[in-house]
Image: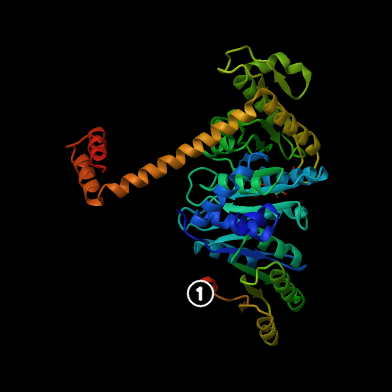
Amino acid sequence: MTEKKIRVLVAKPGLDGHDRGAKVVARALRDAGMEVIYTGLRQTPEMIAEAALQEDVDVVGLSILSGAHLALVPRVIELLKANGQENVKVFVGGIIPDEDVDKLKAAGVYNVYGPGAPTEQIIADIRSAVTPG
Amino acid sequence: MTSTIQSILDGNRLALSRLLTQVENNTPEGREALAALFPYTGHAHLIGVTGAPGTGKSSLVNQFALHLRKDDKRVAIVAVDPSSPFTGGAVLGDRVRMRDLAGDNGIFIRSMAARGSLGGLAATTAQVVQVFDAAGFDAVLIETVGAGQSEVDIARLAHTTLVIEAPGLGDEIQAIKAGILEIADILVINKADRPGVESTERALRSMLELAHPLRQVWNHHGRRYVVDAPPGNDGSDSPLWVPPICKTIATDGSGIPELAEAVARHAAHLRQSGDWVNRERARLRSETETLLQERLMQNFRQDVPEQAYHQVLEQIFQRRLSPWEAVEILLKRQK
Ligand SMILES: Nc1nc2c(ncn2[C@@H]2O[C@H](COP(=O)(O)OP(=O)(O)O)[C@@H](O)[C@H]2O)c(=O)[nH]1
Ligand SMILES: [Mg+2]
């Protein structure tokens, strides 16, 4: 009997060019025992929602450095809902101005992390987000 | 019939995806659904894609699936990657190479971690594949890293097994040692744009000649060979399939139509020779026997008190009982 594993989609929407940060987070989550589905650069919100559906993930982590978060993130959340995946928790990492953090949370984002956020914190937050009750 | 089963048969992707998780986690719901879906299985062509990391398996699966889509075949992809033996976690990155398949409802890609299974397949990969089969996918492509025992597992599960090599990796000899050629139905030299293709091909051909001595006779005919084996050659009277070598460039799709043709030929060969049915039967039989073993063991452990079991083990450790005698004693204790 295999136990339930936390499955996380790590995606990089938008056009900014590197994914070092996303890969660091992906590895940290793996080292915390999670199964991370990594999709690579330049994902559209449609691609992200489709991957989340096919992979039946518990969490979607979005890494955004381009500044386009207000356009991209709410769209991802909208598509997840449209697919019936309103239970999926969305996390955002990247350079997000303070005033936008509240807007993202209002749009349904579970939490937002700056570039220096300790991965231990992200791991703990994911665990408590997906634990029922 | 439950609504889950009906929606999966009707093509509901969310229901399918959620059931795959249940099956992967081997939950009671998952097992129940598998039982209900079983009568709908047996139609998909199961195609294994194995080889060393970095040879281009995911890129090739991407191109091959695109090709199958031209014929409007519905394609499921199961991409298995190893789990970390230390943490149980995994990074599953095969989708990175499959972005061309996004936005197509005729495709369904599922990543799986091997989860402590020793081979390249997870313990539940065969069941996940069964669900896709029942859900009406025409082909299921199963990508797995070739290492140790896993080739044998994939060859047992798939109707057609592609073994992927790439030039310049220096691993030809390694792969051959691991017996990978014996499980290949089709050999693919990917990265045919790279230097060293000829020497890789030469190495593979000479190994093939060792493994399939009949091939030499037909060597001058071209790149693939279906030869009639003398009766009794391998205990069956089915004509022999000698693995063709296909050269591909998975980054631009070169060689993919020829590969697809070889795959189709292999399927036709299996059906003609009766091996399609034979392989299915062998697989279902071994699946049943594995389950039976697990259950018998479970029942046994329930019947015999934990303490009694450990006492007998202890006597073995002390060399006062041999394992054979211990088994007799334990079986008598049962009930
Ligand atoms: N030059 C060249 N590179 C390739 C080819 N196929 C795959 N690659 C590259 O090889 C690397 C590994 O490919 P991937 O499909 O992930 O290999 P896998 O680990 O076997 O699944 C990637 O950088 C691909 O772009 C090919 O035919 N030619
Ligand atoms: Mg791969």
Quarter location, residue B208: top right
Residue flagged by tag 1: what amino acid is it?
Ser
Quarter location, residue B314: top left
Identify the residue at horizontal 29%, vertical 47% (top origin). B303
Residue tagged 1? A128
Give the answer, above or below, for where B177 lies relative to B311: above
Callout 1: residue from which chain? A
Q: Furthest-right residue in view?
A: B70
Q: Position of residue A77 (x, y in %)?
A: 70, 73
Q: Position of residue B330 (x, y in %)?
A: 25, 40
Q: Is residue B316 left or right of residue B110?
A: left
**Quadrant location of the N terminus of chain B in the rendered image:** bottom right
Q: Position of residue A79 (x, y in %)?
A: 73, 70
Q: Furthest-top residue in view?
A: B230
- Front residue of B198/B36: it is B36
**Quadrant location of the C terminus of chain B in the rendered image:** top left
- Using a 10 Å C-alpha cutoff, classify the residue at mark 1 as few (fewer than 14 neighbours), some (14 to 19) or many (20 or more): few
Residue B6 seen by the camera: yes
Q: Furthest-bottom residue in view?
A: A99
Identify the residue at horizontal 60%, vertical 48% (top origin). B37
- Front residue of A19/B127: it is B127
- Front residue of B144/A26: it is B144
- Front residue of B189/A20: it is B189
